[in-house]
Image (cartoon, grey):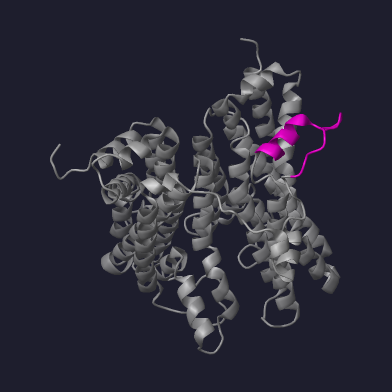
Amino acid sequence: MTNYSNPIIERELITALRKPRSLAMQLAPAVVLALLILMRWPTDSQVGLSGLRALDVFRLFAYGLLGTILLLVPAFPAMSIVREKNQGTLALLLNSPLSGHAIYLGKLFGSLGFVFLPLIISLPAAAACYAMGGISLTGDLLALYVVLSLATIQYTTLALLVSTITTNADSALRLTYGSVLAMCVLCVGPYQFVQGWSPGLILTVSEWIRCLSPIPAVMEILEQRDLGAQGLISASGTPLRYCSLAVLTAIGFAVFTLRNLKQTMFDRPRPQGVITDDRSQVGQWVRRGVFLVDPQRRKTSIGPLTNPVMVKEFRSRRFGRVHWLIRLVAFCAMISLGLTWLATTGTFAWGPETIGGIMVVLQIALVVVFTPSLAAGLFSGEHESGGWTLLRMTPLSPGRIMRGKLISVLWTLALLLLATLPGYAVMIWIQPILTQQICYVLVCLVLGSLFALTLSAMVSSFFKRTAPATIVAYAALVLVWGGTMLVWLARDAPFGHETVATALVINPMAAALSVLDVANFGDYELIPSAWWATGILSILCLVVITVQLARFTRPQ
């Protein structure tokens, strides 16, 4: 090893590449992308002169690669520093001759060396797209890889920042994926409300906020209409704006991480706080509303008919505490009511299908973000902490243990779904003819939540540690729902109507959007087939969980 080499880079790469699941995570996306191109490769020795066929395949390839980056990139760097902190090796690194900058650069380049592998492995598939013709080497292919490379760097630096401020791998993964979702999806929201306005400060700010997401930049490179555009004119120059913001945000994340990455990060005194009576009258009322349910109060005894495992999950899981759920439910309820009010007052020329589609996407996004983080540790967390041995010593049956754990997450998901019911209720009150459609939408969302819960819990039963279980649960859920949306994006090229309809059957979001007759979804009749498919898959996951619990509780 030379004097100029960084030992942390080599250690990070070797640690990541030695794991068998890392090889599968790297090769699986490349194999899927290659198969998609092979399915559309010309077999009659003829190439379309218009290039539309090649452009359709290139769009499918680009969206698949973007989804791969959003799913796989945050996982490894999010656990890089917090894992060192929990194992006690971070303190040794900070006391070593290596400076904080050297430690951070080692972590950064080690993580980038691992997360850049999907981009490198996808180059043969990209070359095949270029060989089909119809796309430009610099304007399309090179621009796409520049945007995706900057997105990889941006989310890696974000994950490392989150890894320094969290205390365990579970919270690091949850916060990282939530931040990535906010930067990719929620940043696009403000522009959807103000597009079409006369030029001004609000429109300019919303355009720049939208450019924090790589999705509009990729769509402009692929020569598609802007995401959710209203009218005939949409903003251009998005890729260049995104590249500038990605570089600036990556530098900002790196600076904040370096400020935290020092020996004093272990010496964080708790704030002294302020007595409620010393606050202003408004502050006192706000505090009483926020802490309407205080988890620090003395708990009552567990009733004879109450499942003790459910109570244990609620009291030991931080996010399961009621005051956090009340805040989240209130936030979602205000968003749904705000969207409905804007539509009914005529502020925006949106129909009920557009408002309903936005609320459906919001609910599914919440389910995708929170369900794996809550359910992936139901069984793997017990093995990791040694609590499963204590559960086996209790007189509780495997069925009661499973019901207690699943119900604890089910209550949380029920609150998330109930949060947007006021918006649907206002829509029904204004247009009673939508009652049946909204009821069908709610059934789709309930079944989708049950499937996400059972799938994540089933994944948890196969792992002994929570962090890999959480990553696999996110990957499985995004693969099932996001993969079907990729098939929908490739409708008519290369997939036909029947193939797309068959793929969308297991996607409750697509079923809800088809019920609402959202654009490009109303052509597919997914009800009641989607209900049966989602219900059967949920039952199969429950059967697997039951078999796994029977194996765990078997006398040794």
Residue 542 picture quarter = top right
Residues drawn in magenta: 297-316
Please indicate whether residue 454 sits to the left or right of residue 103 in the image: right
Residue 312 picture quarter = top right
At a point 71% along the width and 77% down the height, the residue shown is: 342
Position in image of residue 147 (x %, y %): 35, 63
Magenta stretch contains residue 302:
yes
Can see residue 536? no
At a point 76% along the width and 61% down the height, the residue shown is: 289
Residue 308's place in the image compared with 27, above or below, is above
Please indicate whether residue 83 sits to the left or right of residue 415 in the image: left
Q: Of residues 227 and 81, which is closer to you in this image?
A: 81
Residue 312's place in the image compared with 45, above or below, is above
Position in image of residue 130 (x %, y %): 30, 59
Position in image of residue 513 (x %, y %): 67, 61
Residue 230 picture quarter = bottom right
Position in image of residue 535 (x %, y %): 72, 41
At a point 40% along the width and 38% down the height, the residue shown is: 84
Magenta stretch contains residue 47:
no
For the N terminus, give its image quadrant.
Answer: top left
